[in-house]
């Protein structure tokens, strides 16, 4: 999901055009009786639009896609 848009030749005269836009990002947490526990992952929600072209025909699709990434931890020097 690093690239926000692109075009791919799928072969057999089919071309896919796509566009991805970030809707929201969150780092989940849970409150316990003792402390607030934060997730080791960030969650991202994207709206992805895809258009497939074949000769003179074209068809569009739209979907939401979740992605997660591990949060980098800063290690303190010993």
Image (cartoon, rainbow, N blue to C red):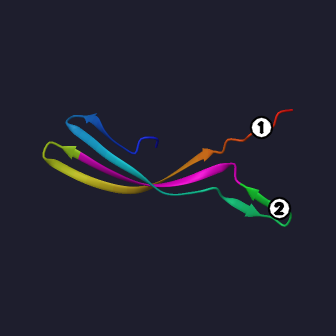
What residue lies at 12% left-to-right and 46% top-to-bottom? 56
Q: Residue at x 46, y 43 (%)?
A: 1
| SS for callout 1 | loop
**The magenta stretch spans which residues?**
39-52
Q: Which mark is residue 34?
A: none
| Residue 3 horizontal side relative to residue 25, left or right | left
Residue nearest the observer in this picture, 27 or 50: 27
Whether residue 25 appears in magenta in the rendering, the answer is no
Give the crowd class for mark 1: few <14, some 14-19, many >=20 residues within 10 Å.
few
Residue lying farthest bottom?
33
SS for tag 2? loop
Q: Which residue is drawn at 76% across and 57% down?
A: 37
Q: Is the magenta stretch mostly helix, strand or loop?
A: strand
Q: Residue reaching furthest left? A: 56
Instruction: Tell us which disc is closer to us: 1 or 2.
Output: 1
Q: Classify residue 55 as left or right of residue 33.
A: left
Where does the image place residue 57, in percent across and percent down from the top left? Answer: 16, 49
Q: How far from the left and from the top, in percent, is residue 63?
A: 40, 56
Residue 50 placement (x, y as % from top left): 32, 50
Residue at far front of view: 77
Residue of label 1: 75
Query: Could you tell me which residue is drawn at 80 percent across and 64 percent down?
Result: 32
Residue 40 among those drawn in magenta: yes
Q: Front-most of 74 and 55?
A: 74
- Residue 42: x percent and y percent? 61, 51
Q: Name the residue under label 2.
A: 35
Mark 1 or 2 closer to N-term? Answer: 2
Please identify the quadrant where the C terminus is shown.
Answer: top right
At label 2, counting other C-alpha atoms closer than 10 Å, the crowd grade (few under 14, some 14-19, many 20 or more) is few
Image position of 11 (left or right of 38): left
Return the residue nearer the eye: 61 or 37: 37
């Amino acid at each position: 999901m690093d690239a926000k848009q692109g075009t791919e030749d799928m072969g057999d005269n089919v071309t896919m055009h796509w566009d991805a836009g970030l809707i929201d990002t969150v780092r989940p947490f849970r409150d316990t009786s003792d402390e607030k526990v934060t997730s080791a992952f960030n969650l991202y929600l994207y709206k992805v639009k895809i258009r497939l072209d074949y000769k003179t025909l074209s068809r569009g699709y739209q979907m939401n896609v979740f992605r997660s990434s591990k949060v980098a931890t800063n290690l303190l020097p010993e």
